Image (spheres, rainbow, N blue to C red):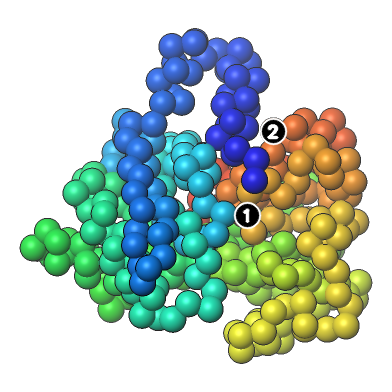
Amino acid sequence: MNNVFDGVLERIESIKEKIGLTDLEVEVLMAPERIGETTLEIDGDKLPAWRIAFNTVLGPAKGGIRFHPEVSEGEVKSLAFWMTLKNSLAGLPYGGGKGGVKFNPKGKSREYIDKVSRAYIDAFYKNLGENIDIPAPDVYTNPEIMGIMLDQFEKNVGHHEPAVITGKPVELGGITLRGDATARGGFIIIKELLHHIKEMPARPTVAIQGFGNAGLNIARMLYNDNFKVVAISDSRGGVFDEDGIDVNKAIEFKNKGNSIVEFSDNEITNDDLLELDVDILVLAALENQITASNAGRVKAKQIIELANGPVDQHADEILWNNGTLVVPDILANSGGVIVSYF
């Protein structure tokens, strides 16, 4: 994986003169306040783990925890930085934070996931708190895991503090809207975008990379609002149908534990999906999906960054020069943290 944080530094360097940032301001902006790193020992496995508070000028750090085999310190730093900007853009009294554990949760038992979740909190709870740093769900973490983490935090501190964790089950003080909030925010942005695009057809075509929480829910919302969803994909690959996919049936299929690549015979790769000639391309997977190597082949007229950092610095420049509109992640996926604030 590219060092994502190097890309963040490069991007800031490229725009500092355009927005009038001094060298000192850049230095302050790009220096994480607190980097927590450890190794969790779970059933003989050694799992690297991080919790980073990037900037807390506006309030306590806020950001998700992801379980993924490609998590790295550079990635977590980048995500925490983007959370800083996202919270500022949304006008929320939060700073930016993020966390991660480097392992593949697929195929792991509930007991194993429980141990990872509790060990993570044991490692970092002293730097967490409703006024210090507030975790949330992210890639391959969910309300159940947030509930486990809340339970472990409260055991460690000896008092009830539900506001330390967002994205938790409603029964534990969560909010009903949080489940599809990231997707709903992206959907609202797309609907607003349509007011500014004169040549958008009556039924825009959409391709969606990523069929986890955010991708699945925005696919459902767009399909039910009469957008033509022609391609969807998960980590194994995707499917394409120029006449439109029945997204509700695809969701039912996915929820049975199947990969979306098996939903129909019209199989495509994730790389193929990125290069489809569609009106709107929704990126709801991981970072660095569109780079200098493939940006020139992207045909979508509008790109929605529902994932964090899916378009890298060099690709941004190519897409800009080609007239492609990219709605950045700090706006497009801010629905999740806005509802977390509620």
Residue located at (34% from left, 62% from top)? 41
Question: Label 2's element?
Answer: helix
* Nearer to me, 95 or 104: 104
Which amino acid type corresponds to the residue marked 1 in the rendered image?
Answer: Leu
* Nearer to me, 140 or 29: 140
**Horizontal and vertical percent for residue 317?**
77, 30
On-image quarter of the C terminus: bottom left
As drawn, 83 above or below 20: below
Which amino acid type corresponds to the residue marked 2 in the rendered image?
Answer: Gln
* Nearer to me, 312 or 331: 312
Q: Is residue 309 left or right of residue 172?
A: right
Task: Kindly tell me whether residue 37 is visible in this rendering.
Answer: yes
Residue that label 2 marks: 313
* Nearer to me, 111 or 23: 111
Please report whichever mark, 2 or 1, sits nearer to the chain's N-terminal start.
1
**Number of other residues with Cα within 10 Å of mark 2, as a class: few under 14, some 14 to 19, many 20 or more:** many
**Horizontal and vertical percent for residue 201?**
87, 59
Residue located at (55% from left, 13% from top)? 20
As drawn, 84 above or below 152: above
Residue located at (84% from left, 45% from top)? 294
Task: Kindly tell me whether residue 66 is visible in this rendering.
Answer: no
Q: Is residue 258 left or right of residue 48?
A: right
Q: CA distance from mark 2 to mark 1?
A: 15 Å
The part of the image, by quadrant, that contains residue 150 is bottom left
Rendered image: mark on residue 286: 1
